[in-house]
Image (tube, rainbow, N blue to C red):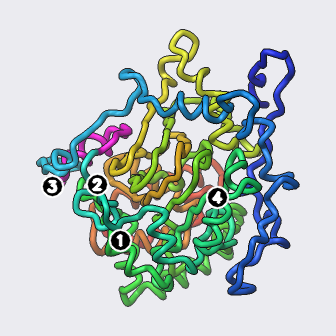
C-alpha cells in the first residue's frame, strides 16, 4: 500500500515505517505513571533501546560513523526556504486586519481583508507580525514561551503528549526524556506535547497562559462560539431532550457512536499548546469538522507541506485504515516525489512553508498537511469555524461527528445569526427530503430534527 521504499546504494530494501507510539491508544500504558494514578513520575517511560514502538533508529540514524547523519542531511535540506514557486504567500499582519465592505447572501457587512481574500478562497498563507504584542513571544533577554522558560515556570504541571489519549507528563520529566540518548535524542519521531487542556477552566495555568497570547484579529470570528449562547438560553434543556429522544429512534450507527462519546455541554477541542524536539511533528492529516486553523511558532523552526483538497490521499501516503506515517519518515520518502515538477501533477502541487518564531501559518479547511519540527519548537494553535468557505459542508460534518453539539450550535445561530441559521435549515431540510425520497431513513440529515424551525420557510 505504500510506495516502493527508497533505494540505497547497497541495494538493500528499506524497512517500511513502523506505527508511531502516539497513534496507539494506551501504548506501554503499564509502564507509564499518569496523573490519575500518582502525582510522582520518575523515568518510567521505557522508550529506550528496547522499545519496539518508538525505536526507528535503523530508518533515520541519529548516530553514524560518517561525519553527517541521515537526519542531519534531511534537516539541512528542509531548513532551506522553499522555492518561490512552492512557498506560501507571505502577508503583513496589519494589512490583513484592514476592513473591507462585502455583500454575502444579501447581508452587507464589514470583514477583514484576510477573511475575504484567504478564508473565502481557501488559500494557505504565512502571516508576519501577529505576535508583536504577545507576552508569550520571547524577547531577547526576557520571558516568553521558550521551552526552558516554561519548564522553569511550570516544572510540575502535567501536559498531555498526544491528543489521542490522556497520558500525561510533567514538563520536568518531559525535559529529561527529550535530552537523553535512550529517549528523545535518538527516537526517529520523539513524543511531542499536544495538549488541548491547557486552556480549559480547570487547568491550574489556564488564566496565566490565556493572558499571554490572543487570537490574531485578522481571522474571522469562530462560529462555534455561538453554541455558548444556546447553553445560556432557557429552552436549551427542552431542545436537547427532544434531540435525545429522536436519537434513540435513529439507527445511524456512526452518529449514535459519536454521541455516546460526546459531552453535550462541551465544544470539540479547538486550542492546543504544542511542544516538541527536532524530528517530532504531526503526520499527514486533515483538520476535523471542516475547520480552518492557525498555528503560531513562539520558539523553533517548523517545515510544512500542504496539499490541495483535490489531491488523492493515497498518492501522498495518507491511506485509509493504515498507520499514519511519522512526519520525519514521510519527508525522507515522499518529499522529493511530490516536489518533482516533471512528474508530479500540477493540480496536486503542494504549498510549502518554512515557519520561524513569530510567524503564523493559516491552514484552510480540507487541505491535507503535515509538519516536522527541525529543532525544539513551542507553538500555539487554534481551530475555528468560518462562514467564509464551505459552510454547509461544515454543518454536515458537525452533524455526523458531533450531533449533540450541532443542535446547540444551531440554537445559537437562531438567536445571534439568523442568516446562518436560515442557510442551515434550508440545506438540512433539502438533504433530509432527498434522503426520504431515496428511502435512506438513516441518512445524516434524518438523524437531527430541526424541522420545527419554521421561521425561515
In this view, the mark in front (2 or 1): 2
Q: Are marks 2 and 1 in contact (CB under 8 Å)?
A: no
| Quadrant in the picture for residue 88 | top left
The part of the image, by quadrant, that contains residue 313 is top right
Marks 2/4: CA–CA distance: 34 Å
Which label's residue is closer to the chain start, 3 or 4?
3
Rendered view: 298 above or below 113: below
| Badge 1 or badge 3: first in the primary sequence | 3
- Residue drawn 47% across and 78% down? 200
Measure how far apart labels 4 and 1 are at the Cα level. Answer: 40 Å
Residue receiving disc 3? 109
In this rendered view, identify the residue nearer to me: 264 or 317: 317
Q: Which residue is mark 1?
A: 226
Instruction: Please report contact status of discs 1 and 3: CB closer than 8 Å, yes or no.
Output: no
The Cα atoms of the two marked residues, 2 and 1, are separated by 16 Å
Point out residue 40 in the picture as x, y percentages from the top left corner: 71, 84
Q: Earlier in the sequence, mark 2 or mark 4?
A: 4
Q: How many marks?
A: 4
N-term-proximal mark, 4 vs 1: 4
Regarding mark 1 in the picture, which secondary structure is present there? helix
- For disc 2, the neighbor class at 10 Å (few under 14, some 14 to 19, many from 20) is many
- Seen in the image, is 148 located left or right of residue 164? left
Name the residue beneath numbered marker 4.
Answer: 178
**Does 60 sit left or right of 128 as displayed?**
right
User: Range of the magenta residues?
Assistant: 107-127
Gap between marks 1 and 3, in whole Å? Answer: 18 Å
Residue located beneath label 2 in the image: 219
Give the residue drawn at x 45%, y 32%.
Answer: 352
Tell which circle, 2 or 1, labels the residue nearer the N-terminal end: 2
Amino acid at each position: 500500500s505504500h510506495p516502493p521504499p527508497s533505494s540505497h546504494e547497497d541495494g538493500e530494501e528499506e524497512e517500511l515505517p513502523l506505527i508511531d507510539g502516539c497513534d496507539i491508544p494506551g501504548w506501554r500504558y503499564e509502564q507509564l505513571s499518569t496523573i490519575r494514578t500518582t502525582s510522582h513520575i520518575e523515568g518510567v517511560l521505557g522508550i529506550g533501546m528496547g522499545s519496539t514502538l518508538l525505536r526507528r533508529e535503523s530508518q533515520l540514524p541519529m548516530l553514524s560513523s560518517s561525519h553527517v547523519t541521515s537526519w542531519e542531511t534531511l534537516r539541512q535540506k528542509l531548513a532551506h526556504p522553499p522555492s518561490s514557486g512552492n512557498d506560501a504567500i507571505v502577508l503583513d499582519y496589519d494589512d490583513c486586519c484592514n476592513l473591507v465592505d462585502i455583500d454575502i447572501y444579501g447581508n452587507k457587512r464589514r470583514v477583514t481583508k484576510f477573511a475575504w481574500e484567504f478564508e473565502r478562497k481557501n488559500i494557505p498563507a504565512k502571516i508576519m507580525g501577529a505576535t508583536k504584542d504577545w507576552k508569550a513571544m520571547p524577547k531577547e533577554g526576557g520571558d516568553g514561551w521558550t521551552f526552558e522558560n516554561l519548564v522553569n515556570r511550570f516544572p510540575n504541571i502535567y501536559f498531555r503528549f498526544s491528543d489521542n489519549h490522556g497520558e500525561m507528563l510533567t514538563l520536568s520529566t518531559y525535559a529529561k526524556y527529550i535530552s537523553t540518548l535512550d529517549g528523545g535524542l535518538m527516537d526517529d519521531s520523539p513524543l511531542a506535547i499536544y495538549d488541548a487542556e491547557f486552556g480549559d477552566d480547570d487547568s491550574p495555568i489556564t488564566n496565566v497562559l490565556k493572558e499571554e497570547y490572543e487570537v490574531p484579529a485578522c481571522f474571522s470570528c469562530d462560529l462555534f462560539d455561538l453554541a455558548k449562547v444556546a447553553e445560556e438560553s432557557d429552552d436549551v434543556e427542552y431542545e436537547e431532550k427532544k434531540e435525545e429522544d429522536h436519537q434513540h429512534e435513529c439507527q445511524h450507527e456512526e452518529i449514535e457512536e459519536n454521541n455516546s462519546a460526546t459531552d453535550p455541554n462541551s465544544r470539540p477541542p479547538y486550542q492546543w499548546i504544542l511542544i516538541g524536539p527536532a524530528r517530532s511533528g504531526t503526520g499527514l492529516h486533515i483538520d476535523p469538522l471542516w475547520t480552518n486553523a492557525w498555528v503560531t511558532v513562539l520558539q523553533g523552526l517548523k517545515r510544512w507541506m500542504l496539499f490541495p483538497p483535490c489531491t488523492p490521499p493515497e498518492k501522498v501516503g495518507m491511506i485509509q485504515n493504515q498507520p499514519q506515517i511519522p512526519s520525519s519518515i514521510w519527508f525522507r520518502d515522499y518529499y522529493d516525489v511530490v516536489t518533482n515538477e516533471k512528474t508530479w501533477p500540477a493540480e496536486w502541487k503542494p504549498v510549502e512553508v518554512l515557519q520561524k518564531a513569530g510567524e503564523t501559518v493559516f491552514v484552510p479547511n480540507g487541505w491535507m498537511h503535515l509538519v516536522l519540527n527541525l529543532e525544539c519548537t513551542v507553538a500555539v494553535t487554534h481551530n475555528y469555524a468560518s462562514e467564509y468557505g464551505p459552510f454547509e459542508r461544515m454543518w454536515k460534518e458537525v452533524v455526523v461527528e458531533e450531533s449533540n453539539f450541532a443542535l446547540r450550535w444551531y440554537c445559537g445561530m437562531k438567536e445571534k445569526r439568523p442568516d446562518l441559521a436560515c442557510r442551515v435549515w434550508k440545506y438540512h431540510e433539502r438533504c433530509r427530503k432527498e434522503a426520504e425520497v431515496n428511502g435512506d431513513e438513516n441518512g445524516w440529515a434524518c438523524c437531527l430534527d430541526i424541522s420545527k424551525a419554521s421561521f425561515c420557510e
